[in-house]
Amino acid sequence: MLQYQALNEYRALIYARKRRDLFVEQSQLVCREIGDGNLNLVFHIADQITGKSIIMKQALTYARVVGESWPLTLDRARIESQALLIQHSICPGFVPKVYHYDPIMALTIMEDLSSYLVMRKGLASRVQYPHFSRHIGRFLARTLFLTSDFALPSQEKKMRAAQFMNPEMCKISENLIFTDPYFDSETNRFNLLITDAVIKIRDNDQLKLEVAKLKEGFLTHAQALIHGDFHTGSIMVTEEDTKVIDPEFSFYGPIGFDIGVLVANVLLSFASHEGHTPDSQERTNYQAYLLSMIEEIWSCFEKEFRDLWEKESKEQMTVIPGYVDDYLLQVLEDTAGYAGCEMMRRIIGLAHVPDLESVEDPNLRAKGEQLALSIGQQLVLERWQVQGINDITSRVRQIAGL
Ligand code: SR1
Ligand code: MG
């Protein structure tokens, strides 16, 4: 194709059929558009004869969730395919394989993960994943440490940061996470039953000052190539396996942002069980599991990160006693702060999470939403007191009355 054109199922099928590296001439392809995200088209294409299948993801020129009135850069498809390649080289098996990238069509063909479940859905059904925390802690440590100044020569790191300048996608996060929720912005929407809580947040100057500081860190702290949208809808799981998808928001940003967004989304699931799981024993058991998951993610991340610091560091200053402890404490503070921001914006901003949206009874939903807002505020305000991951989880227990 010489010119960008948005695909439909028929055109996607024709495109795939031409790729002889993927499908043979006799293949009988079927194609379904399966995208349910906020931004892109996602086609599942399978050969009925061999059973071989692929995913074809195409960026639209606008945000799908809003429509053509919200134009959006096609460059996000390049960012995503290049980030996937880097993540694959650093942490093989933890991201889908990329088979083909077409810059003109803003399209990536990648491994089909249909046998995996979106993590968010698994958590909604109270599934426990025995290997998940270890996998994701390792993924975070490796992708973040090995793209940082500690592992890359100074010039190469700066070239990478330039390669992953992602201004339009960053601007979305700057607005939707760190700005709009704190003003009467027209993009906001929320359950009217929590209006009082929303007004209190907008009137809380101390909270807004802390959010402003976190926003500044997001804007300026180019620590590592972060995923940039590391919620539980960006992770696919089986009982045995974990894959991270969708790094179209990737850029050089603060390490604690990725960990914080993940922690927030586990906590949003925690809050949603106030509405989804009426049996209190069942609810508290699963909520306790979610908190232990957060503790394990952090401890696996920390262990692997310290290991890499010791064995893979190319930065001379990393031998200074106490540096790694100091660095990880700052990452933990950021994790708490960014988790708090992500929790609040998912309740009162534009982009909500299905975990809570699917609670039909507005009163029950409000209960979960209020809990999420309380946790979010405390994480932002009290992040300076956090010394270890247990300080975060015990605070959540206290707020939830567990
Ligand atoms: C218009 S985009 C809204 C949200 O969807 C993405 O997944 C990001 O989380 C973004 O903030
Ligand atoms: Mg996404």
Image (cartoon, rainbow, N blue to C red):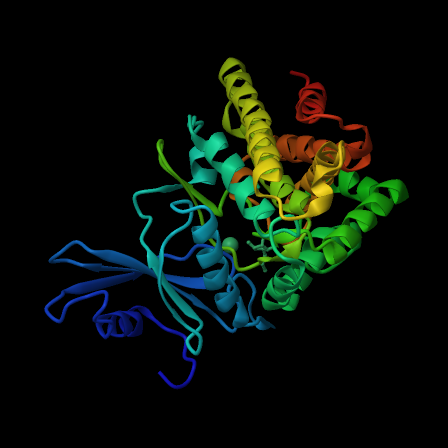
Quadrant of the drawing holding the N terminus: bottom left
Question: Which residue: 76% across, 51% down?
Answer: 217
Residue 100 image offset from top left, x and y in percent: 35, 67
222 sits left or right of 36 in the view: right
* Extreme-bottom residue of the structure: 2
User: Residue 390 appears in which quarter of the rendering?
Assistant: top right
Quadrant of the drawing holding the C terminus: top right
Front residue of 217 and 88: 88
342 sits left or right of 92 in the view: right
User: Residue 106 appears in which quarter of the rendering?
Assistant: bottom left
Tag count in the figure?
A: 0
Q: Image height check: is 132 above or below 155?
A: above
Question: Which residue: 56% across, 19% down?
Answer: 288
Residue 22 image offset from top left, x and y in percent: 23, 65
Q: Image height check: is 335 above or below 388?
A: below
371 sits left or right of 225 in the view: right
Q: Image height check: is 337 above or below 229?
A: above
Question: Which residue: 75% across, 38% down?
Answer: 330
Q: Is residue 62 visible?
A: no
* Extreme-top residue of the structure: 281
Residue 231 image offset from top left, x and y in percent: 55, 44
Q: Is residue 138 visible?
A: yes
Q: Image height check: is 344 above or below 99?
A: above
Question: Which residue: 30% across, 70% down?
Answer: 12
Residue 203 image offset from top left, x and y in percent: 87, 44
Front residue of 271 and 237: 237
